[in-house]
Image (cartoon, rainbow, N blue to C red):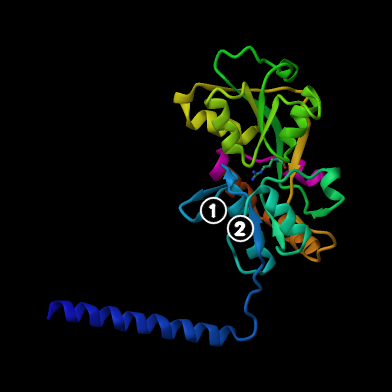
Amino acid sequence: MKKVTRLGLIMIMGLVMLLAACGSSETSGGDEKKKLRVVTDAAYAPFESLEGDQVVGFDVDFLSAVLEEAGYEVVQPEHVGWDPLFIEIESKEADLAISAITINDDRKQTYDFSFPYFLSTNKILVPEGSDIKSGADLEGKVVAVQNGTTGQETAEAILGKNSKDIKKFENNNLAIMELEAGGADAVVADNTVIEEYAKNNPEKNLVVIEDPSFAAEYYGLMFPKDSELVSELNEAINKVFDSGKYAEIYEEWFGSEPDVDNLKAQQ
Ligand code: ARG
């Protein structure tokens, strides 16, 4: 008897929720929010990584704030992988990509970018006690990178474009695994990613080497060429900067204050 009552209660609750849902969609009428398709490579914590089937990270929270500000439905980026995301944007199968993507001249020929939203630079991840102390020391060493990233470019600038000593991986986690397995002497990747990794995995005894000659890079949302979304979302990005929402999300993920003025000065 007790079971039946509980079941009955659950059914009533379900019915109430259903009615409430119908009610709200009726009242919101025609102005249902537009939904964009956003793609990413969720193997780049703390920007985007998979937690079960959820993509989480700074990029995800920043994207949510921007979509909300622009009046779009707040969606999660879909994990498609790094090389595929460029294909999806070029062929316009997706509306935009967010994936710690560095804005650069080469990519600008094929894609459009939003205003910069994050300052980054490449750094070098090595085992403790390594004799690699600078970028130049990578010469003659085996370097693991994620294929098609600015980390690869940085390594190529030192080792040469077709160097066999550069091992390229589909994602950055695989590059780090190669280092840990002893198949590479270093990984070159975005500072925040390898710094977090070294900090969160102290038992791996890894250290991060900085080379001041490595360029400053800025991340942007990436769109198909001539997408109308660019100016719309740029406006939303500035509102997210100005409202303090950006600083709030940044502090949540990185525990420090962002230099919003510097980001805005790049526009
Ligand atoms: N910022 C670098 C680039 O644009 C690396 C980005 C890699 N992102 C990722 N989600 N795996 O080349």
Residue designated by label 2: 77
Residue 191 is inside the magenta segment: no
Please state which amino acid type lies under the numbered disc 1. Val
Asked which quadrant contains residue 192, the reply is top right
Ligand 1 position by quadrant: top right
Q: Earlier in the sequence, mark 1 or mark 2?
A: 1
Q: Are marks 1 and 2 in contact (CB under 8 Å)?
A: yes
Q: Is residue 146 visible?
A: yes
Q: Is residue 202 left or right of residue 154?
A: left
Residue 256 makes an appearance in the image: no
- The quarter of the picture where the N terminus appears is bottom left
Q: Secondary structure at mark 1?
A: strand
In the rendered image, which residue does mark 1 sit on? 55
Mark 2 lies on a secondary structure that is: loop
Between residue 53 and residue 264, name the one nearer to us: 53
Give the residues drawn in magenta, as a range. Answer: 252-267
**Residue drawn at (78%, 23%), measured in percent from left and top?**
158
Relative image position of residue 251 (x, y in whole percent)? 57, 43
Q: Magenta stretch: residue 260 in it?
A: yes
